[in-house]
Amino acid sequence: MKSLVIAEKPSVGRDIARVLGCSQKGNGSFEGKNYVVTWALGHLVTLADPEDYDKKYTKWEMNTLPMMPEHMKLVVIRQTAKQYQAVKTQLFRKDIGDVIIATDAGREGELVARWILEKSQCHKPIRRLWISSVTDKAIKEGFAALRDGRSYDNLYRAAAARAEADWLVGMNGTRALTCKYNAQLSCGRVQTPTLAMVAKREEEIRSFQPREYYGLTIQAGDVLWTWRENKSKSFRAFHREQVEKAAEKAGQGVLTVTAVTKKPSKKSAPGLYDLTTLQREANQRYGFSPKETLNIMQRLYENHKVLTYPRTDSRYIGSDIVPTIRERLKACGTGPYRKLAAAVVNRPIKADRSFVDDRKVTDHHAIIPTEQFVQLEHMTSEERKIYDMVVRRFLSVLYPPYECEQVVFEGAAAGESFVARGSVVKALGWKAVYEESAWDEEEEQENTLKEQRLPEHREGEQLKVERAEQTTGKTKPPARFTEATLLAAMENPVKYMESRDAKAAKTLGETGGLGTVATRADIMEKLFHTFLLEKKGSEIHITSKAKQLLELVPEDLRKPELTAGWEMKLSDIAKGKLRQDTFLKEIRSYTSQLVDEIKTGQGTFRHDNITNKVCPQCGKRLLAVNGKNSKMLVCQDRECGYRETISRTTNARCPKCHKRMEMLVKGKEETFVCACGYKEKLSAFQNRRAKEGAGVNKRDVQKYMKQQQKEASEPVNNAFAQALAGFKLDE
C-alpha cells in the first residue's frame, strides 16, 4: 500500500516528491514506489455562501438576518475545482492506505488539508508532517518522524471554529450594515478594531495643542553642556523667563565639573526575527508593505529554501536547533557574510537564553537560515534585502555583546545645573555584523541628551564658559501610523483599549494582539482595498467612509478586547481545554445581538466622495477613491462594478525636484506628472532614461506596466465582494 502526501502548494509538493523519489508525473500529482504526492492550491475547499443554504439569502434583505445555518457546509472553490478533483481521485485509490498531511505546519495549514478530507468524505488513517523548512534534509528528517494525525484534531477544531465564527460575524454584520445604510459597508472582529486604532490616533492628532518649550546649551572646555532644570531634571522649560535668567547667570561665568561618572555598559544583540518584527523593519528600511515582505519571505522559504517557515510569532529557537547552527553558518557563509560567519563557525556555540528558550517556541521557531547552501546571484534585489536582514540578525545573536564605557559629566555654573554625555567603544561585538549606520540608536527623543565625544575632565575642574545659546521648539503630536507602526499596534493593542481591564490586557498580550502573524498583512491590505484607509506618502490616513462606519458599528466590535477573548478561546480549543461547540454557541448568541443592535441603530451614512462624473454603464454618479497606490473612480452600485483608474503612484523620480511622480493613464499616451508641475509623456521618459544610461529598457518598462495593470485589476472590494454582487444599491 502507498501513502498519499498532501502538500499546500505545488512547489513544496514537487520538492517532497523529489526527496521521496516520486518521479512519475500524474494528474496534479507525482508517484513513486511508496508514495503519491499531490497538493492544494492554497485552499481548495471553503465555507459555503449564504445562498447555498437557502435561495432567500440571494437577495440582501434585513428580514432574513441573522443567517444561522444549523450545520456549516463546505463547498469546492470554483477556481481550483480541477485540482480538488485530482486530489479526491488519489484519495480514493484502492492502493492508497493512508494520508500524510504535509501542508504548512500551523492552524490554517491544518484546515487546508482537513477540509479536503472532510468534503471528500475520506476516512483513511492520517499522519502529520511537521517541519519548519523545506530543505531536503528537513523533509527527510520530517518523514522519519511522522506523527499521528489525530493528535492534531484539536488544532483543526480551533481552525474550523475560527473560520465559522468569522463567517457568522462577518457575513451577518456586513449584510446588516449594507441593508441598513444602503452603502457598501463591512465589518469584522480584526479589521474593525484595527480601524478604530487609526481613528483614535487621528483624534489625538486633531485635538493636540502644541506647547512651546525652551532650552539652553553652553560651550565650556570643548564640551557642549545642556542645561537641566534642578527640580524636574528636565532638559526643557515651558517658561522663557526661566531659561533667559539661567542664560544670563551662567553665560558669563565659570562652570565647575561637579561629577564624572564612568559606567561600563554591555548590550546584547536584538532578538531573532518573527514575522511581524521583520515586516516592521522591512517597511522602515525599504518601504516594503507587510504583504510584500510576506510574499518575499514565502519565496525564500519555498523556492530558494534558504530561510525557515515565515509565519511564526516566536523570536526564539529551541534547544533542538542548536546542534544545527554550525551547518547553517556554513550554508549562509558566502559573499558578504563569509568573514562574518567564519568568525563564529569554529568557536563553541553559546546557546544562551537570549535566543534559545524551548518555553518561548510556539508552533514554529524564529526565522533563521536553513542548512541549504545559498546562491545569492539567483535572488532578486528584494529577496536579497530580506535575506540580508535575516542572516545578519542570525549572525548577530552568535556574536558577543557590544561593550562601551558610558561617560556622564555634571557641572554647575551660577547655581544652574548642566550635563553632558558620551561613550567610548570598548568592543564592537555584534555591531560588527552591521554597517556602521545600520545600528544608529533610535531617533533622539525630544527630551533626551545627545551623545558627543568627550575629552578628559576631572571632578572639581573649573572651565570658562565661552558662549551660551538658547534653544526653542514645540511639542509634537503623536505621529500618524505607517504600515510598520500599525503592525506594531496590531501586535500590542493594549494601550488602545477603552477599558483598563487587566485580565483583557493580559489576554491580548498572551494571544499576540489583533489577528495573527499570518493574517495582519492581509487585513491591512483589505482596509486599503475597501477604501477605509489610504496612504499619503508613508503615512496612513482614515477615510470619511471609515469614520462613518465606526460610528455605525456596535461598540463591542470596535474594541480589541473582543478579538482577544476569541483568540484565547481558540487557543483553549487547540489545547483541548474548551469544546468547539461551546465556543460557537457563544458566537451565534453574539451574532444575534450584533444584528439586533445594527437594526435598531439611529445613524445615517452619506457618500461625501460623489463626483459629477456619471458611470458609462449604469448612469449613476461615480465615487472618487484613493487606492493604496492609485486614484480611481468607482461606481457606487456594486452590481455594476464599473471602475476606472485615473492615476497611479510610480517609483519614477521627477528630474526637477526628485520626488516620486504619478502616472496619468487617461488620453492617448500615459503621462508622468509631478506635484511641482513637471509633466512628461511615457515615450519621452523612456528616451530620457535611455540617454541617461539608467538601464531602463523596453522590457523593464513592459514589466513595470504589466505589474501596474495587475494591481489595477485586483478587486477593490472586501472579502464579501461576490456576495455583494447580488445586492443592488439605490442611487
Image (cartoon, rainbow, N blue to C red):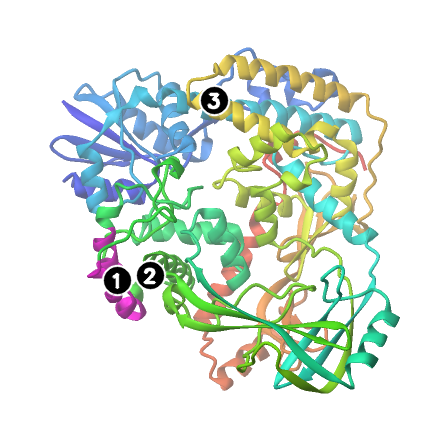
* Residue bounds of the magenta highlight: 325-347
The relative height of residue 58 versus residue 495 in the rendered view (above or below) is: above
Q: Nearer the viewer, residue 600 or 421?
A: 421
Determine the residue positioned at 57% across, 50% down: 713
Label drawn at residue 572? 3
Image coords of residue 611 (percent x, y): 81, 51
Q: Amino acid at mark 2?
A: Tyr
As drawn, the residue found furthest toward the top would be 70
Q: Nearer the viewer, residue 25 or 135?
A: 135
Give the side of residue 434 with respect to residue 602, left or right: left
Determine the residue positioned at 19% across, 18% down: 94
Image coords of residue 399 (percent x, y): 33, 61
Gap between marks 2 and 1 measured at Cα? 7 Å
| Residue indicated by mark 1 | 344
| Residue indicated by mark 2 | 399
Label 2 crowding class (10 Å Cα cut-off): few <14, some 14-19, many 20+? many
Gap between marks 1 and 3 measured at Cα? 42 Å
Q: Earlier in the sequence, mark 1 or mark 3?
A: 1
Image coords of residue 479 (percent x, y): 69, 57
Quadrant location of the N terminus? top left
Give the side of residue 9 with respect to residue 591, left or right: left
**Residue mark closest to the camera, 1 vs 3:** 1
